[in-house]
Image (tube, helix red, strand yellow):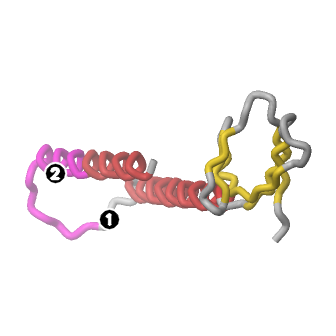
């Protein structure tokens, strides 16, 4: 996922550099006269910079949220019709899959077709 974001940013930078060089090549060389800077580009640059900053902030926020949410500790109760007692495990949310999970101890548990799971969050 990170490589997709980096690749997208690389493409944006390369496109910007290409268009900038193309604009410089197409403009005829005139003698430089000291004039006021053109302010028509300023709003476009400001909007572009703000857009990039907002996109970057949202991307970082998304990854931080996924990491925090994935590291949330859950208490999983496995109730099997073959055993009389339920089994209790602690699992990180990111390790919980459809038919299996990996406990905090590294034990991989596969769930049968008739087994039931009860999932609760563990209070800190």
Tell me, yes or no, whether the two marked residues, 1 and 2, touch with CB atoms within 8 Å: no
The residue lying at 82 percent from left, 57 percent from top is: 121
Rendered position, 84 above or below 88? above
- Residue nearest the observer in this picture, 87 or 121: 87
Q: CA distance from mark 1 to mark 2?
A: 17 Å
Horizontal side of 9 relative to 78 (left or right) equals: left
Residue bounds of the magenta highlight: 17-35
- Residue nearest the observer in this picture, 104 or 47: 104
Residue 12 lies, in percent from the top left, at 33, 48
Residue 103 lies, in percent from the top left, at 67, 56
Q: Secondary structure at mark 1?
A: loop
Residue 16 lies, in percent from the top left, at 28, 49
Of the image marks 1 and 2, the number of the one nearer the N terminus:
2
Q: Secondary structure at mark 2?
A: helix
What label sits on residue 37 in the rendered view?
A: 1
Horizontal side of 44 relative to 124 (left or right) equals: left
Q: Is 39 within the magenta? A: no
The C terminus: image quadrant = bottom right
The residue lying at 76 percent from left, 56 percent from top is: 89
State which mark lies toward you, 1 or 2. Answer: 2
Q: Is 20 within the magenta? A: yes
């Amino acid at each position: 996922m990170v490589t997709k974001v980096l690749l997208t940013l690389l493409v944006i930078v390369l496109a910007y550099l290409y268009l900038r060089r193309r604009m410089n090549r197409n403009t005829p060389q005139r003698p430089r006269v000291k004039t006021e800077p053109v302010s028509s580009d300023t709003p476009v640059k400001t909007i572009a910079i703000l857009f990039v900053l907002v996109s970057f902030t949202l991307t970082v926020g998304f990854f931080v949220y996924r990491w925090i949410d994935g590291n949330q500790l859950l208490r999983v109760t496995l109730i099997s019709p073959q055993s009389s007692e339920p089994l209790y495990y602690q699992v990180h949310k990111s390790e919980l899959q459809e038919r299996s999970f990996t406990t905090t101890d590294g034990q991989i548990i596969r769930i049968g077709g008739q087994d039931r799971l009860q999932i609760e969050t563990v209070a800190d």
